[in-house]
Image (tube, rainbow, N blue to C red):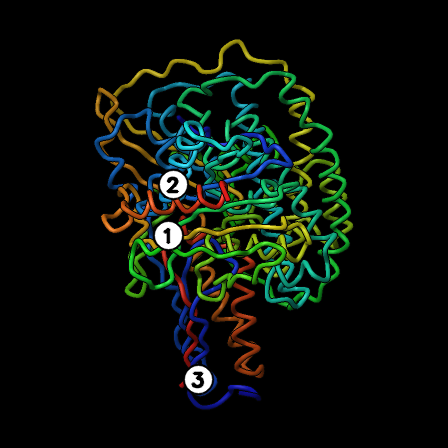
Amino acid sequence: MTVPPFWPPRPGSTLVVGFGAVDRGDDAVGPVVARLVSDELAAHGPTGVQVIVHDDPTALLDLIEGRDLVVVVDAVHSGSPPGTLTVREAGREGRALTTGADRGWAGTHGLGLAAMIELARSLDRLPDRVVVVGVEAAGFEHGRALSAPVVPAVAVAAGTILDILRA
Amino acid sequence: MTGGMTSGSHVLSVELLARVEGEGGMHVHVQDGEVRDVHLRIFEPPRFFEAFLRGRAYTEPPDITARICGICPVAYQMSACLAIEDACGVTVPEEIRLLRRLLYCGEWIESHALHIFMLHAPDLLGYDGAIEMARDHRELVESALRMKRAGNDLMAAVGGRSVHPVNVRVGGFHRLPTHAELAVLRPQLVAAREEAIAAVPVVSDFAFPDFEQPHLYLSLTSEHGYPLESGSLSTTAGLTAPVRDFGSHVVEQHVAHSNALHSTFDGQPYVVGPLARYSLNYASLAPLAREAAEAGGLGPTCRNPFRSIIVRTVELIHALDEAIRLIDGWQGALVAAVPVAARAGEGHGATEAPRGLLYHRYRFDDDGTILTAQIVPPTSQNQAAIEADLRAFVQANLHLSHGELTHQCEVAIRTYDPCISCATHFLDLDVERR
């Protein structure tokens, strides 16, 4: 199943969004995992889950509007071994994320994924539950494919997301 | 550290600049009250793009170069299209030029709303960033997000996507938007225009440092109004020239401390971007935007980079007003694109990215294969002027504490809205006082 780059948000539904640029090495892991999740959902359910890929984290505020559960999957760079999976609860009840802006990790004009989640928290626009699934990246070079350590993490990340959706 | 730095050796350092596109830094060395060195250190991805464009087809640069930047992809697409069409001897119909201008308005709205309210305003209101500012100024941030969304939706309607649009091609567009798709955007754009006008007193009420830059200003000027999608070169020295003459005046050179190329115009540092555009095109602003400029305390020129937040707000109003005007006047087009046949030759294109003039040059084989490509983004062009400004700013403010001066340097750099992803890959600020 092909996931359109942008589906109009359907408030009330559960959202899975894979952030990243498909042609920048391991930055593609978010979209690749989202596509796998979409395929699995189409084959085995549950229904009522909207899956989106996007390459601009600043879109998050619009995408999460009216949702109860949002699962975000993105490449991360924390110093862990490439391919390492991290799962963080970041919704209303979750802990605040480190934006990394002071370390230059925050992406587009300092407004990366973590910054947008925290901005949503400041504006009281965060859904009850937001789960951030991060896959540690090895590199973000233009034109590169996923790195060898990240490839096996795709199925693991997709399985983790499906477990969350089916719980 | 407290007190000034008029004697001894000092280093001011910010490892990584926050709230700029990409990562990067700067090194300033102060010795016995004199600024010795100011180095902006940069790695520059567009150099790689220039290399891997060689051997590709003449139809590919709009999509490939759009990937250089997530904030200004339309600028890359537009400059690429103009350069390729110039080489192929094609001028697109007026309707396609108007649609390009409308798409470009979307990018300006999106980019300026982001920079004014989320990146620059926190400095002036005394916050570490937009997240902290949002707790106390929620309505300002909500308003900024609504304005940005108006730009995003315009980009999606005309460009197919709000980021890295996919609807642009050499000769025009893959698909024309329908009247209904454009009309539905109008109320949102009108509301955003009102919000931008309402923001003028907010952004002009800050205490701006008294600082003026002496540099040459370079911008496009255009018979079609305030420059976005086309125009000719114009400078504050009175020069006017066709875009093809860009290389006769602008010289790029390597400097030891940076991977990015520094540019000079006729041998001197120069500035592109909102201040240059505004100062060279004040008369072309929409009446509403000119009124806003006056209300914001601006004259027909502005040379204080710290006041660029007012100029960007004026340009935001202009872009919203222009988008509404273009939608109201949209008559449709006979074709979405005109044929552009390959031929050997060289072409030049320049448009006004939100951060300033973006120049592309391509040379093609007779089957349209790219032989050479040159991309000169705005932030690269501004590097020498940024360094010169920082040198003057630090020298004039050595009485400030180490921490305050470091902070002011970072603020000063952000006033340029540097897009280091376009010009660089990594930047960190390091001010050394010995």
As drawn, the residue found furthest toward the bottom would be B8
Q: Do callouts 1 and 2 mark residues in contact (Cβ within 8 Å)?
A: yes
Do callouts 2 and 3 mark residues in contact (Cβ within 8 Å)? no
Label 3's element? strand
At 51% from the left edge and 77% from the top edge, which residue is drawn? B395
Query: Which three-letter amino acid code belongs to the residue tagged 3?
Result: His
In space, the residues marked 1 and 3 are separated at their CA atoms by 41 Å
- Above or below residue B222? Residue A73 is below
What is the chain letter for disc 3?
A: B
Q: Name the residue under label 1.
A: A135
Above or below — where is B389 with respect to B144? below
Q: Few, some or many C-alpha atoms within 10 Å of disc 1 (few <14, some 14-19, many ≥20)?
A: many
User: Looking at this rendering, what residue extends furthest in the top direction?
Assistant: B334
Whichever of callouts 1 and 2 sits on the residue coming sooner in the sequence is 2
Front in this rendered view, residue A59 or B423: A59
Q: Report how far apart the C-alphas of labels 1 and 2 lie in the structure.
A: 10 Å
Q: Estimate the x, y position of residue B241 in percent, counting from the top left.
A: 45, 37
Lateral position of residue A91 relative to residue B293, left or right: left
Residue at (44%, 90%) from the top-left corner?
B8
Q: In this view, does B389 lie above or below B157?
A: below
Q: Which of B101 and A25 is in front in this view?
A: A25
Type of residue at label 1? Val
Q: Quadrant of residue B196 in the image?
A: top right
Residue A61 visible in the shown view: yes
Discs 1 and 2 carry the same chain letter: yes
Residue occupied by mark 3: B10
